[in-house]
Each structure stands twice: as C-alpha cells, then as structure tokens.
Amino acid sequence: MSPPRRKHWLDWQRGLAVLFMIEVHILDAWIIPGGRVGHERLYDLLLYLGGLAAPGFLFMAGLSQALADEAHARKGLDPVARRRAAVGRGLWLLGVSYLFRLFSYLAAIVLGSPTWGFPYVLGVDVLAAAGFGMTLAVKLGAWHPRRPRLAVWGGLALVLISFLWRGAWRGPYWHDVVKVDVLNILAIGMMLSAWLSVGRPRLVGVALTAGAALLVVFAAPWVTEALRARDQAPFLETLATHPVAKLLDVPFAYLSGVPPRAQFSLFNWVAFLLAGAAVAPLATGADRPFTFLLLALGVFLFGRFAAPWILQPVPGSVLWRADAPAWFMTRLALHLALTGGLQLLPGFVEPALRWLTLLGRQSLTGYISSVLLTYGGVPTRLGLVSALAFPALGWAMAVMVAVTWAACRAWEAWLGWEKARLAAAGAGGSAA
C-alpha cells in the first residue's frame, strides 16, 4: 500500500530544501573570486533560492513534528510520554549537531593541517581511554547500564574534554565545534515546540506555537541590537585567545550572532519551526492547497504593508535585514505557498519524483553529506574550493546532487539491513 497522499509533498518539500542547500553551498564555496561578474542577475537569483534552504528545513521540522504527534494521538499514546519522547528527539539531534561539527573539525585538521592532526587526534590519555571504553562497552553489550544512551553520550563527552584538555583549542579550527549552526537551532526549536504543543489540545498547541513565533519575530531586532557588541572586533579578539570566554559566550551566540560566533540564531530563525507547528492542523486529513496559498498571500501582505509601522530599536534601520519581521514574513509566505503548490501536483508524478522523495526522507543525511563534501578537506585537496568559473557551477551542483542522493540511498539501505538483522536476532532470542 502506498503512503498517504500528503506524505509525498512532505518529502518533496524537504527534498527541495536539500537541493537549495546544495546549490547555495557550492555557489558560496567553489566559485572563483570575482566569478559573479557578468552573471550578476543569475547569481543573485541562485543566492536567494539557496537562502530558502534553512527556513525550509526549520519550517518542515515543526510541521512534521506536529503531524507525527497527531498520528500518535490517534493511536491513543499518553500525552506526557509523547512530549517526553519529542523532547528526547530534540536532545538527540542537538548531540548529533555537536558530533557532526567535532567530526568536521577532526577531518579539517587531519586533511588540512598535518601539524595539528596526529598529536591531537591520536593522542591518548585517561579521559579519552575511559570515554572510548564506555562507548565501546555499551555497543558490544559487555556493559548494560540502566541508561545506555546516557553512558554513550557521557563517553563521547569525556573524549571531547580530553581533546580540549590537551590543548586542541589552540588549533586553527576549534571555534567551529561550538559555533551555532542550523542543526543546533533545529534541535532547540524541536524541544521548544514539543514543550508548547506536543500532547496538548490542538487549539492550545496552535495558540502557544503561533504566539511564541510572533514573540520571537518581533523581539529579534531588539535582541540583535542588545547583543551587537559581541560581534565586534574587540570582543571577537578576546574569544579567539580565551577558550573559557568562548564557551561562556555560546548561550549568547544561540540568542543572536553572526559568523564566526554563529551561523544561525534562535532570534528569529526558530520562529520558522514554530510557525510550521502552528499551521500543521491545516495539513491533517485531506489536502488544502488553496488554504495554504491564501494563508501565504495574507502573511506576505502583512509583512509588506505592516513593515513601516513596526517599532524598531534603531530609527531608520533596514526593514529587510535577516532579523526584521518583514524579512521573516516574506520567507514564511514563500514556504506556505510552496506547501500549497506541491499539494496541487497530481499523484501520477510521484514515481518520477522518487529521487526527490528519498532526499526528503533522508534530509539529515543529505545535509551532513553535502556540507562535508562541499566545505571539508576533500574538496580542498581536490582543488575545488574557490576554483570554478560560474558556468561550471551548474555541472558541479548536478554532480553533488547525485553524490548526495547516493549517500542517502546507501544510508537508507544500511538502516534497512540493520533493522532486519535486529529483528532476526530478536526472533531468534524469543524462540530460544
């Protein structure tokens, strides 16, 4: 039996976010200096489309979480247990985001800086040995703690502490480990959305998530202005030389910051996820494409015409910068319209879009694979970084889409094999 009709557009919209992300990453990392000259309009269009990737990931995460909770509610699962499980998934993703950045850091220093590679990656002390030992013992079944996940994360934390204790923070890339990125914001947003809406009556969840989204959106310019000094040169110089100061700054970077402190911040990026959770009831049951399209039009018009009347912390400040409510409303309207447009697609296109369905179904794997293959040490060694003329970027994007799809396909196949293996082992144990 094929999945419900609505699940197709859910995966397609997530898959489009993966495509937008691949496009903007290659455009940012591989184009030669001055490569946009003569192609300014197309460059700006591609850059704008790529800027829809992160809002799309966040919006769809909130929407999907709320729809999953609706399905669990229909099965009669306990509301408190559902909320606790949803918060746990957010914590798991937060751990994945830091492990991903740590792995990227290790790969960068091994492939890009041999001086920092072997002394710090292969160095062993008591903390590192204890951490690896805890993780390996749980994985192999030699140790059965009451909370195995806590033991695994604790072991990995000991490895990280060992790494920093041995002076890894003096390396050229370590700041990237604690930099706030879109996965961090997505994880925190999932936990916040779970607390506000999962396991609660539908109207209560909609009111809480929509209210929180509006609060974040209209507070974002004020939070940015209050923390602006932390993105200036004097403060950044302090962070670069004092690792403790860097770690203490992380909570503030979550609230608001720009590179190198943060790539994304809670204000106002998390509002996309909360907005997705707020509109999720419209996605239950039969498709409502025209409802989404009308809602998109209303959000766009509100952002466009209300912008001059919104109180700003600095008179005359730019209304279309990333922390402005009008900027948020425009991009939210585009994703609402995309949801409605994808719902209008006829069912017979589904077989032709299975490749996009796979990218959407394994969007986290697609994100990780694309980032590592675009910015990591491999493209640096291959001479691709800042090396391609503008016309060649199209071929590079097509190849990266194919490679990312292959990574997603391999990961899904491995997950299926692992699930079958565990099921067989469980059946054998029951028989015995």
Image (cartoon, grey):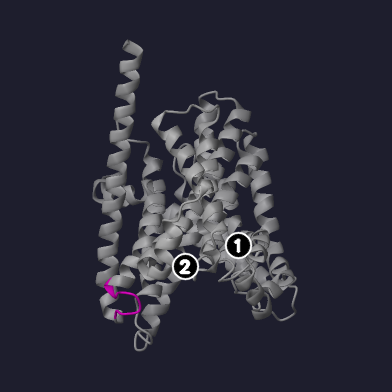
The Cα–Cα distance between marks 1 and 2, rounded to whole angstroms, is 15 Å
Query: Which quadrant of the figure contains the N terminus?
Result: top left
Tell which of 93 and 73 is nearer to you. 93
User: Which label is found at residue 51?
Assistant: 2
Residue 61 in the figure: left or right of residue 79: left
Residue 168 in the figure: left or right of residue 253: left
SS label for mark 1: loop
In the orientation shown, which residue stands out farthest toward the top? 432
Q: Residue at x 65, y 54 (%)?
A: 213
Q: Please state which amino acid type lies under the numbered disc 2.
A: Gly
Q: Residue at x 26, y 65 (%)?
A: 398
Q: Residue at x 59, y 68 (%)?
A: 261
According to the picture, the residue beneath numbered tag 1 turns out to be: 265
Displayed quadrant of residue 21: bottom left
User: Which label is found at residue 332?
Assistant: none
Is 210 part of what is drawn in magenta?
no
**Residue 59: % across, % down:** 52, 53
Query: Which label lies toward us, 1 or 2?
Result: 1
- Earlier residue among tags 1 and 2: 2
Q: Please state which amino acid type lies under the numbered disc 1.
A: Ser
Residue 378 visible in rendering: yes
**Residue 397: % across, % down:** 30, 67
Most common SS among magenta residues: loop
Query: Which quadrant of the figure contains the C terminus?
Result: top left
Tell which of 218 and 78 is nearer to you. 78
The correct choice, above or below, for 398 with respect to 76 in the image is below
Span colored in magenta: 382-388
Q: Residue at x 52, y 27 (%)?
A: 74
The correct choice, above or below, for 143 with respect to 35 in the image is above
Label 2 neighbour load within 10 Å: few <14, some 14-19, many 20+: some
SS label for mark 2: loop
